[in-house]
Image (tube, coloured by chain):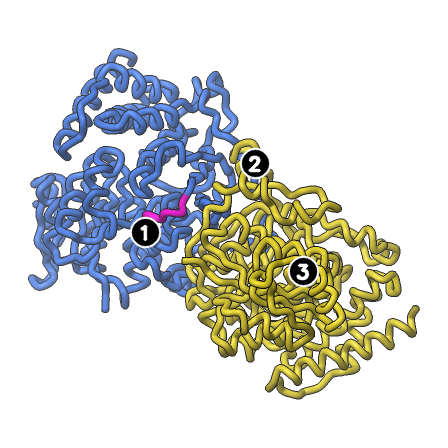
Chain colours: A blue, B yellow
Amino acid sequence: MTLKISVLGASGSIGRAALSLALSFSDLLEVTALAAHSNLAILNEQIRLFKPALVSVSTDELRRELASLLADLPRSLQPELVFGESGLISAAIDSGAQMVVSAVVGAAGLKPTWAAVNSHLKVALANKESLVLAGDLIMGKALGTLSPIDSEHSAIFQALGGRLRVPELKKIILTASGGPFRGFSRKDLESVTRQMALKHPTWSMGPKITVDSATMMNKGLEIIEAHHLFGLSYDQIEVLVHPLSLIHSMAQFHDGSILAQLGPADMRLAIAYALSYPERWPIVERAERLRAKSYKEELDHKKKPEGAVKDLSDYQALSSIPDLSFEPPDLHAFPAMALAQAAGRAGGLAPSILNGANEEAAAAFLDQKLSFIGISEVVGECLERLHSDERLESIDQALEADQRAKALAKQLIAKRF
Amino acid sequence: MTLKISVLGASGSIGRAALSLALSFSDLLEVTALAAHSNLAILNEQIRLFKPALVSVSTDELRRELASLLADLPRSLQPELVFGESGLISAAIDSGAQMVVSAVVGAAGLKPTWAAVNSHLKVALANKESLVLAGDLIMGKALGTLSPIDSEHSAIFQALGGRLRVPELKKIILTASGGPFRGFSRKDLESVTRQMALKHPTWSMGPKITVDSATMMNKGLEIIEAHHLFGLSYDQIEVLVHPLSLIHSMAQFHDGSILAQLGPADMRLAIAYALSYPERWPIVERAERLRAKSYKEELDHKKKPEGAVKDLSDYQALSSIPDLSFEPPDLHAFPAMALAQAAGRAGGLAPSILNGANEEAAAAFLDQKLSFIGISEVVGECLERLHSDERLESIDQALEADQRAKALAKQLIAKRF
């Protein structure tokens, strides 16, 4: 019995890693739909490899371009091509998939995730914005069908045996690598560049999330995500900087016991668990196969190949596990995490505003139109100026707040530039 | 609904810790039987506190002495008093207990454990010798009813969600504090004393197990115990020295993921989990009550009070978790662990011989009749001279081998003294 999956965000880092698993576990996984923003070269290859029934891209023009790229395929292998927001939703729910890998970047991931949840499909969630913007609405419907892909949340999910809500859970500790600027003072951060921010010490990820890691906004968004996933108050969520990123997070129970999950910094581990929980697939045993056939490697010529899923035994012997060290996060130099905590506690539309402003500000930084410390300043100002006591009652309301925040952030950034 | 428990080894370190829990969780636990070797002062107090129906001591003389100590009790509170091996078995199975806390020290724990298993009672096992001597026989009958109390095995049991056999389990890493002589060379060990061996850096335990920790024989016995409990080959069991004893052990799955259990060095945590699994009792929330009423504290005036169950938050904040470091065990200086691995791999009667010889040798060391390095030398010689290819088919056979080993060890020790 194969599990039919739809992969949203197929050309991104998580999407490609998920498809690399689908290649290695073709006996367990069948890909019925793919959606990508605009990377037609990757999509073209993926369609030929996985033969999905449905494929979505962001615009009608790209759809037509993709159709001509696929013209040589026999009619039986031609997928249905759709586009835009409705196309993305269709890729989530109309291909016969049993599980949606929701790995679109940003607030754009909310609508298709919401559609999948409402269609009672299982969702393996990498799009943390879905929970940041509308966590209460989503968790109200998806408690038994959602599994997290973020490595930190996967760590907690694993420590809880593949469950999201455990009455004995007292507290979680999200670990953070500290990013490329760990130890930098606020003054040091004034002069850091795009290039410096994109060099993450331990994880290879897309550019937006890498910048979020550098500002520690990513950890802030993860706090909000964890609040919703595990039903914890913000006081029950701590963050600990652990530069080696070997411990991915820890769960503490009301008897004082802590379970920590450790593993290699390879997203395929967390993705596989999100697909297979509470069981685990033998991804290390298929490591050679992954090494040989890694889809990510095949397509991603710019980066060095990641090769096989690393086992901790790659540290020659387990006896050479390096020392694990921990330190508190520096919220003075990295105020973004504190902003996210405050927005999470405020609830309502505040997390949507935070996230929208950050998407705009992080993009401007990547575009070299905003300084690094400007990111959290812009986010902070948007939160202050767009403050409202409105309760969150619909997905559209969250997306409107997101748009308002993006518009204001754009203005603030233009003024500074 | 209370759980009725029988505590064998009630006056020892584990027994008292279990009874301290029974005091704090009197709404959940009811003590129906107690067995102790000879400490009548402690037993007298325990009988008055817990009102068991049945109590066993080691000899008829002690039984009569205890009866006179209890003479002032009203007849309805007078427990049935029994003695010797049959008394110990009776304390396990005849008091109406649903679960037996098997915490007798040494090979003497095997018969009552075997009786409990054969009576289909649940067994919370601290007596590792039961598995060392007769693991195959016991696990053949107790797979669904046994829970480990040893902190390392409890850590694995917790990582497996309260299960002993998980098909995805690939390997376990038992952590070891390294004991009081970590870093000592074989030469350094020639002159260490009883007093030095009894100063364990992280755990407060009985004298026999503390000496076993110093020789690392304890870790060797734990390897054999883990082999039986979790159904792992000896190649799947590694040992890592982790001086802080914060990580109690780790389980690695076939997807490369590792779950590590961390916690304070307090046996009440592991005992409580062995009683409550897969649920967890709020032992931290009752910490104040434990602090006030700790039975161990009341009776154990010689030692400093252990106070409340320590939470990791006792490290001021979680952000001050100290660095965790690891190193390989030094099997040259500490050959006992390697002897135990070899005996485990040989199987049959070898583990019984190892354990019997070690019990005798450790006792002689505590008696100052054998040097520290003499312990593993005696054990090694007994293993060599009593080697047999006999298969283990009965409990009596294991106990006979234990006796043979003890007799030979006694001779070897006398010759050296």
Looking at the rendered structure, the kind of residue marked 2 is: Asp
What residue appears at the point 65 percent right and 63 percent down from the top-left corner? B9
Q: How many marks?
A: 3
Q: Mark 2 and mark 1: span between their CA atoms?
A: 40 Å
Residue topped by disc 1: A17
| Corner quadrant of residue A4 | bottom left
Instruction: Give the SS element for disc 2.
Output: helix
Left or right placement of residue B207 versus residue A347 in this view = right
Tag shown at residue B287: none
Residues at marks 3 and 2 on the same chain: yes
Q: Nearer the viewer, residue A400 or A156?
A: A156
Tag shown at residue B70: 3
**Residue A9 place in picture, x, y as percent:** 23, 45
Left or right placement of residue B160 versus residue A10 in this view = right
The chain holding disc 2 is: B
Q: Which mark is first along the chain, 2 or 3?
A: 3
Circles 2 and 1: CB atoms closer than 8 Å = no
Instruction: Give the SS element for disc 1.
Output: helix
Looking at the rendered structure, the kind of residue marked 3 is: Leu
Q: Mark 3 and mark 2: span between their CA atoms?
A: 41 Å
**Neighbourhood count class around disc 1 (C-alpha, 10 Å): few under 14, some 14–19, many 20 upward:** many
**Residue that sits furthest to the top in the current view:** A415
Residues at marks 2 and 1 on the same chain: no
Residue topped by disc 2: B314
Q: Is residue A316 visible?
A: no
Magenta range is A165-169
Instruction: Give the SS element for disc 3.
Output: loop
What residue appears at the point 40 percent right and 22 percent down from the top-left corner? A335
Left or right placement of residue B308 versus residue B209 in this view = left
Q: Nearer the viewer, mark 2 or mark 1?
A: 2
Looking at the rendered structure, the kind of residue marked 1 is: Ala
The chain holding disc 1 is: A
